[in-house]
Image: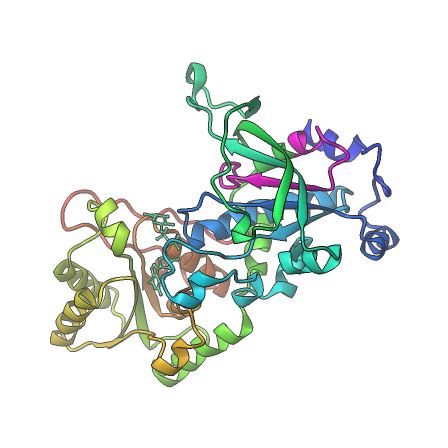
Amino acid sequence: FIINLLTTAAEPNSDIGFCDASSRNCENLVKETSVYKQIFYDVNPPEGFNLRRDVYMRFAIMLSDARKRGRVDWRLVLPPWHNLYHWRSSSAKSKQQPWSSYFDIESLKSFAPVMELHEVFSEINSNVLKIDTLYVLENFEDPFENGVFQDKWQLSSGCVYVGNYFGYKNITATETVCVKFQGPISKLWELILQHPTDRRVMIAHGEIPLHDNYGTKTYWQCRKSMKFNKNLIQIAKNFMFNSLKCKTDKCSTYLSVHWRRKDFAYSRPNDVPSIANTVKQIDGAVKNKFLNVKKIFIASDASSNELKALDEQLHNLNYEVYRFTATKDALKELNDGEVAIIDQIICSHAAYFIGTHESTFSFRIQEEREILGFDSDTTFNRLCPDSGPCEKPSKWTLIE
Ligand code: GFB
């Protein structure tokens, strides 16, 4: 049904209607005449950076699939990074960051038709950006009605958009539509096509629609296109080569750990170990896996007291402990988001990685290691709690 919608329905007022996806002329026409339409999206405010990366992939795949099927007239507008809950440094908090601060935009564009919000502003020649329809998605109260999870959506009322248009006061919506939604993201076309004359639509709570297919070839193509900003990669590589004495992209000189603390430590006390037990598990991995390493790289959001205690206990076992800290000078230039990405890159290249259970920060490192071609056994490892069960991480291996 969805495929039918994508391939046969035509918008009555569209200047270009549908083009054959293979037709370059058609794609050029869209570019030249700026007749394309735009999908904006926003995510539940408390969600962190790495869940948002997954939400991006759902939308990017939706747009890329649509383009393959001939719907070349839509662009995905990348929501600027603004006021993230976990980002406390003033430069990350105070103003909106474009995606180019963190990612390689040309690489994103090689997979999906995306554009930055500032590109939209420079096109419209006006200070006010009007969204035609803002769809505020909500979950159904009972996702398993009559015991089954069914893909569905239903118009509702009384919803509130809890976001703030990425902190821009000059973005407004002409109409707000409340929708209870559950199912794959491609189902959003059914909603969007309800208003065929709309040129700009926005989806609030973009985290609610799910991937159509998880872990497929297309999923990995999209994931691979999410390359980081080149400058951040260079800073991480300098650290890997200079401090960690790494010689190739697959470094043999260090083990890396993502030690998630802060809100995770108290919201999931049964999933994270104590400091002493963290040290025991790192030492256990080095010995049991016969890793010939003395250098341990720790990526963490832990407090300085926790880190000091961890360092001391690792030093007592003769390990050298490394962390990437923005130096005072660099701090002027590197914000929390940038440091977090550098941490992720360094973890991705280690001989062996141990992550935190169900942290999306760790998941993204595991995916990066799959792309780099590490043996899965060196990647899908987690810190276990001090007591109780310790479920092994799911292996989401690369499909090419
Ligand atoms: O990325 P994220 O969604 O991962 O959110 P989880 C955690 C944020 O904390 C990161 C910082 O984006 C970073 O800003 N952070 C965490 C780190 N670990 C590190 C680290 O090793 N190094 C650096 N530099 N920064 C979820 C949240 O977090 O945890 C949810 O998205 C909720 O909102 C849940 O809070 C409990 O999946 O780990």
* Residue 197 visible, this orientation: yes
Query: Is 128 one of the magenta-colored residues?
Result: no
Image quarter of the C terminus = bottom right
Q: Per the image, is 202 magenta?
A: yes
Question: What is the total number of numbered labels drawn onto the structure image?
Answer: 0
39 is higher (above) or lower (below) than 96: above
Secondary structure predominantly adopted by residues drawn in magenta: loop
Range drawn in magenta: 189-211
Residue 90 x, y percent position in the rendering: 40, 66
- Is residue 54 found left or right of 278 in the rendered image? right
Query: Does 148 appear above or below 318?
Result: above
Q: Is 136 placed above or below 93 here?
A: above
What is the basis of the colouring in this image?
Answer: rainbow
- In terms of depth relative to the viewer, which is nearer, 84 or 361? 84
Q: Residue 322, located in which quarter of the rendered image?
A: bottom left
Q: Quadrant of the N terminus?
A: top right
Residue 251, how many percent across, how many down? 39, 75
Q: Nearer the viewer, residue 145 or 291?
A: 145
Residue 260: image location, x then y, percent: 28, 57
Residue at 50% in and 54% down? 398
